[in-house]
Structures are given as structure tokens and as C-alpha cells.
Image: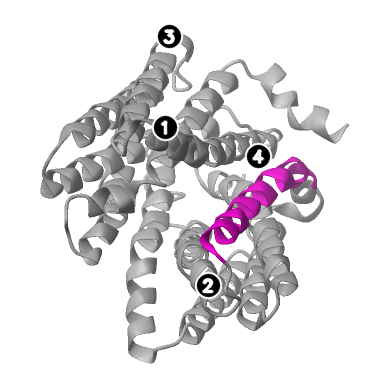
């Protein structure tokens, strides 16, 4: 029954299926290159700091693109942006595959980030367009399922083709995936923003309404902290603590990260029910409490049992938070601000994504311990959640 209701939006909204196909393709493509990035970079003979830049600069590209893409999608429509974004990813991936210079590789990774930012922002605006309040949570949960599913498939496929055809092969695969997503947008997707709406001047009653409110600002700040905490926790703290304290090998650590993604994915079908029962605001607060609990469990983990429990709790928190945050954000905005608003929220999120590894690394170097990183993450998550709950108390979203 739950599974049937989870997929019900696909029957109700014909534009949802191609949108989900596109997001799954793009996320799979992003995942395809993730296993080989650091190894591929090392073949250029560069320092470890520059190797890390391949990840950071991708986030910088998304930061550059998010807000302009959202504003532009409101002017010319979602469909052109959903076509252009993956096309940019495809072209820059082909260029990255053939380049023989690391500086050019960094540049093409930046452009890949720009393409991803364009697509992700436009796709969020499109899902908001076709999600009236009664159906918003279900649509957002399906969107997150497509995103998470693509992200889980990508790394395994990328590692396999790299082993068969070399480290440049995943970039060629990303090119193909980008082209498929662009073709889907061109051939199968009907724009969610009508020609009458696209380019239409904002009514004077709208102005900056929605983007200058306290609830919207609070959810953007919380999004930034969640992205910050997630990238630091999953890609730095979990591997480092598992290796140093529990002496787990890289295969087990990789399995733990995959397990966290599987828990995220598995919990999504119940997220509409939890949001209907407790409201998106309540679920956001509960999910961040679970995330903090997972971090504290990770900190005290001295056995594999506690370690896996920490990953489980962390995964549940992430799985129920994403649809709730997206639904709450859309509810803060008038339709005329969906593009710019989703672009602004993604900008906050990517700022956390870019800043997280840098700040955590500097803190590790300064203190010589991971304790400060965990305490900082817990404090930021707790403070941002309290501010969010206080700022949105008694408020109304659509």
C-alpha cells in the first residue's frame, strides 16, 4: 500500500517521469567519475592539495551557476535550461577526457559544475511548478529517490568501466549520460512554465516576497549547515575514524558509505507519511536531531556495532530530511519566485559543500584531532535547527 501510494504521483502528473529520468541520469553521471577523480588527478603528477581541488572546484562551478540559472529559468522557461545544463556537462566531460594538462582538467571540472548547477536548479524549479501543496511532499520524495538512485548506481559503474578501459573512460560515460539527459529534455519534457508565464514581469505585489522572509532565510541557512555537515561527515570523518580507530579497510569503509546511501533511499517511501503526520517543519527538526545523534555515536564508536549503528542513524536522518526541506522551501515562495528561490537555496547548500572540507581540514591540522570537527558539526546543526524552529514557529507556508 505504501509503495503504491509512493508511486501514485507518476500516474497523476505526466511531466514527472521524464524529469525523474533526467535527474537520475545526471546523478548517475556525476557518480560515474567520483571513484576515479583522485587517482586520475595523480596521473598528472600534481600535489595532493591540487587533487582535492578537483572536488572543490566542481562545487565552485555550481555556486556560480545556481542563482543565475534560477532567474534565467523564470525568464525563458525550465525546458531550455534542462537542455543546456546537461549539454554543458557532456561537452566539458569530453574535454576533460582528452586533456593532457591538469590546469585544463581543473577548468573543465569547473564547467561541469556550472552545467550541473544549471540543471539542478532548473529541475528543482520544475518540480516545484508541478507540485501543488496537496501533492508537494510525494513529488519531492520521488525526485529525491531518483536523485539518490542515480547517485548510488554511478560509482559502481564508473569503477567498473575505469578498470576495463582506463581512467578517462568515466568522463566519456558522463558525456553520453549528459547527452541522453539533454535529448530527454528536448524530446520528452513539456515545459512546466508556460510561455505566458516565462518572461512575464513580476506583479508589483510579489516583489522580493518569499526570498526576503525570515522562514526562507532560516531554511537556506539550515540547508548550508546540512550540506556542510554531510560532506565533512561522510567524506572525511567516517573514513578517517573508521580507519584510525577501528582499523577498517577501504572496502568496509566504502560499504559503509554505500549502506548510508541505501538507508537514505529505503527511508524515502515513508517520508510523505511522516511529513503528513508531523509537518515538514517538524520532520526537518527531527531529522537534524537524528543526524546529530549519528555524529555523536560515530564519535564514541569503539566497536563495529556502534559504528554501523551510527551510519544507520545518520542515513535515516538524511533520508527523511531532504523531501521535508524541499517541501518547506517551496512553501515559502510564490510561484513567480520558484526559479530564483530554488537557485538561492542551492547557493547556500553549495556554499556549505565547498566550505566544509576546507574548514574541517584546517581544524584537524590546528587541533591534531577529529574531536573538534565533530563538536563543530554538532554545534552548527543544533544551533541552525533551533534558529529554524524559532524563526518558523507559528508561521505559514503555502
Q: Earlier in the sequence, mark 4 or mark 1?
A: 4
Residue at point 40%, 63% (across, down): 352
Residue at point 61%, 80% (across, down): 299
Where is residue 249? Give x, y as percent.
Answer: 55, 64
Q: Foreground residue, 76 or 230? A: 230
Q: Residue furthest front?
A: 164
Query: Is label 4 in contact with label 2 (beta carbons under 8 Å)?
Result: no
Q: Residue furthest bottom?
A: 367
Q: Earlier in the sequence, mark 2 or mark 1?
A: 1
Residue 141 tag number = 4
Q: CA distance from mark 4 to mark 3?
A: 25 Å
State whether the magenta stretch is mostly helix, strand or loop: helix
Q: Foreground residue, 82 or 22? A: 22
Label 2: element kind:
helix
Q: Foreground residue, 206 or 196? A: 196
Way the structure is coloured: one colour
Q: Earlier in the sequence, mark 1 or mark 3?
A: 1
Residue 243 tag number = 2
Q: Foreground residue, 154 or 25? A: 154
Q: CA distance from mark 2 to mark 3?
A: 48 Å
Residue 187 tag number = 3
Q: Residues within 10 Å of mark 2 (few under 14, many from 20)?
A: some
Where is residue 143? Give x, y as percent.
Answer: 58, 35
Q: Earlier in the sequence, mark 4 or mark 3?
A: 4
Which residue is identified by label 1? 161
Query: Comparing marks 4 and 2, which lies closer to the viewer?
Result: 2
Amino acid at each position: 500500500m505504501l509503495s503504491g501510494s509512493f508511486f501514485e504521483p507518476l500516474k497523476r502528473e505526466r511531466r514527472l517521469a521524464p524529469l525523474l529520468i533526467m535527474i537520475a541520469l545526471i546523478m548517475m553521471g556525476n557518480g560515474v567519475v567520483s571513484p576515479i577523480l583522485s587517482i586520475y588527478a595523480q596521473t598528472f603528477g600534481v600535489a595532493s592539495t591540487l587533487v582535492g581541488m578537483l572536488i572543490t572546484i566542481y562545487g565552485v562551478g555550481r555556486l556560480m551557476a545556481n542563482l543565475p540559472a534560477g532567474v534565467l529559468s523564470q525568464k525563458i522557461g525550465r525546458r531550455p535550461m534542462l537542455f543546456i545544463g546537461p549539454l554543458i556537462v557532456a561537452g566539458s566531460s569530453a574535454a576533460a577526457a582528452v586533456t593532457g594538462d591538469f590546469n585544463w582538467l581543473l577548468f573543465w571540472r569547473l564547467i561541469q559544475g556550472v552545467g550541473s548547477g544549471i540543471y539542478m536548479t532548473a529541475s528543482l524549479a520544475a518540480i516545484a511548478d508541478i507540485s501543488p501543496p496537496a501533492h508537494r511532499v510525494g513529488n519531492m520524495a520521488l525526485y529525491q529517490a531518483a536523485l539518490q538512485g542515480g547517485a548510488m548506481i554511478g560509482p559502481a559503474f564508473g569503477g567498473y568501466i575505469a578498470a576495463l578501459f582506463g581512467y578517462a573512460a568515466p568522463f566519456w560515460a558522463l558525456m553520453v549520460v549528459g547527452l541522453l539527459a539533454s535529448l530527454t529534455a528536448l524530446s520528452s519534457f513539456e515545459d512546466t512554465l508556460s510561455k505566458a508565464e516565462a518572461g512575464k514581469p513580476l506583479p508589483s505585489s510579489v516583489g522580493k516576497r518569499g526570498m526576503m522572509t525570515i522562514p526562507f532565510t532560516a531554511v537556506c541557512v539550515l540547508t548550508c549547515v546540512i550540506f556542510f555537515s554531510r560532506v565533512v561527515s561522510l567524506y572525511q570523518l567516517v573514513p578517517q575514524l573508521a580507519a584510525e580507530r577501528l582499523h577498517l579497510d577501504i572496502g568496509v569503509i566504502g560499504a559503509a558509505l554505500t549502506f548510508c546511501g541505501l538507508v537514505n533511499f529505503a527511508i524515502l517511501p515513508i517520508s510523505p507519511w511522516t511529513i503528513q503526520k508531523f509537518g515538514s517543519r517538524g520532520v526537518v527538526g527531527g531529522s537534524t536531531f537524528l543526524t546529530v545523534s549519528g555524529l555523536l555515536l560515530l564519535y564514541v564508536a569503539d566497536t563495529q556495532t556502534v559504528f554501523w549503528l551510527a551510519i544507520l542513524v545518520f542515513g535515516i536522518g538524511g533520508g527523511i530530511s531532504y523531501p521535508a526541506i524541499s517541501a518547506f522551501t517551496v512553501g515559502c515562495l510564490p510561484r513567480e519566485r520558484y526559479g530564483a528561490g530554488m537557485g538561492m537555496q542551492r547557493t547556500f547548500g553549495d556554499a556549505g559543500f565547498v566550505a566544509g572540507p576546507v574548514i574541517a581540514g584546517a581544524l584537524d591540522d590546528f587541533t591534531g584531532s577529529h574531536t573538534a570537527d565533530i563538536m563543530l558539526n554538532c554545534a552548527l546543526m543544533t544551533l541552525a535547527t533551533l534558529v529554524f524552529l524559532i524563526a518558523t514557529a507559528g508561521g505559514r507556508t503555502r
